[in-house]
Image (cartoon, rainbow, N blue to C red):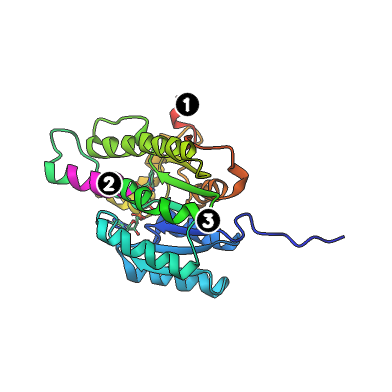
Amino acid sequence: MKKERKGRVEGKMAFVTGGAQGLGKASAIMLAREGAKVTLADINEKGAAEVAAEINEECPGMAFAVGLDVTREDHWKDALAEADKAMGGINVLFNNAGIGGGTTIEDTDFETFKKVQAVDVDSVFLGCKYAIPYMVPHAPGSIINTSSIAGLIAGHNMAAYNAAKAGVWLLSKSVALHCAKRGYRIRSNSIHPTFIDTPILDGMARGMSKEELVRKLAKQVPLGIVGEPDDVAYCVLYLASDESKFITGAEIKIDGGISAM
Ligand code: NAI
């Protein structure tokens, strides 16, 4: 008997921040291909709408876009309400939007430090806080927060980024324990990529071509390559799906072995 294959996240409703490009875009495409509705939320609303249109070409009616500055509490309230209405609920939250911040403690001015905390960790606080009430009636649910390998391992020139991404790591565990204690059937985990070839790497180029930069970064990775966006998207797909139903409060490294050294 031939059984029709069901998508791995069939029927899920996912809210993806930073969905206009990079890891958010790749993950949203994969989630939609595997049967989820997705709302792409980004400060770049036009970019998010373009990605939604691209997804809808392949998977009609599965993607929506909404403007969101993840540092703004009022934006979160509006964007989640809009996504809830558009998709008929929310049960996956991918807190992915983020910015880099590559300087030392002495070279980082306070405004920059605060900006990196706002975009990279305040966003996760606000996202979890305001999405959970939408997710509870549609459980089982999954929250996936993007930290970084830089949330676990420090660098001499990553003061603001290390601080923010380390915050995301333990905040994700606190959320996991809270949801478990309340019996919400909502899981929360953090993911920790190292260098993945997305536009965020442009900020690290400092006069080098992208090819040179990628070659240089690859030398730091035991596997000898930088990652592709789909390397992260496959992990997001797994965590969003019920395949990972016993995994909460965990951190998953997607780092080609860097942290094993
Ligand atoms: P990216 O720069 O390609 O995309 C980031 C997206 O976030 C963009 O669409 C941007 O418009 C959006 N965004 C920025 N500020 C925002 C705000 N205030 N409100 C709403 N949206 C905002 O970056 P990429 O590589 O896709 O990174 C995604 C996440 O992965 C970030 O949290 C980053 O720190 C993390 N990460 C990336 C790694 C990499 O090598 N690409 C490695 C480790 C972590």
Residue drawn at the location 33% of the way across and 34% of the way down: 166
Q: Which residue is mark 3?
A: 138
| 43 in relation to 153, above or below | below
Residue 259 shows in this picture: yes
Residue type beneath disc 2:
Asp
Q: Are marks 3 and 1 in contact (CB under 8 Å)?
A: no
Q: Which mark is residue 260?
A: 1
Residue drawn at the location 47% of the way across and 26% of the way down: 260
245 left or right of 171?
A: right
Which comes before the other along the chain, label 3 or label 1?
3
Q: Which mark is residue 122?
A: 2
Residue 241 pos. (x, y %): 58, 50
Ligand 1 near label 1 (Cβ, under 8 Å)? no
Measure the C-alpha gap from mark 2 to mark 3.
25 Å
Q: Which mark is residue 52?
A: none
Ligand 1 near label 3 (Cβ, under 8 Å)? no
Answer whether residue 182 is magenta in the image: no
Residue type beneath disc 3:
His
Instruction: Kindly give the residue lying farthest to the front in the view shown.
Output: 182
Instruction: Kindly give the residue lying farthest to the right in the view shown.
Output: 1
Measure the C-alpha gap from mark 3 to mark 1.
38 Å
**Magenta region:** 113-123
Residue 255 shows in this picture: no
Q: Secondary structure at mark 3?
A: helix
257 left or right of 241?
A: left
Q: Nearer the viewer, mark 2 or mark 3?
A: 3
Q: Residues within 10 Å of mark 2 (few under 14, many from 20)?
A: many
Instruction: Decide which of 102, 250 is in the foreground and name it.
Output: 250
Viewport quadrant of the N terminus: bottom right
Q: Main secondary structure of the magenta part?
A: helix
Which comes before the other along the chain, label 1 or label 2?
2
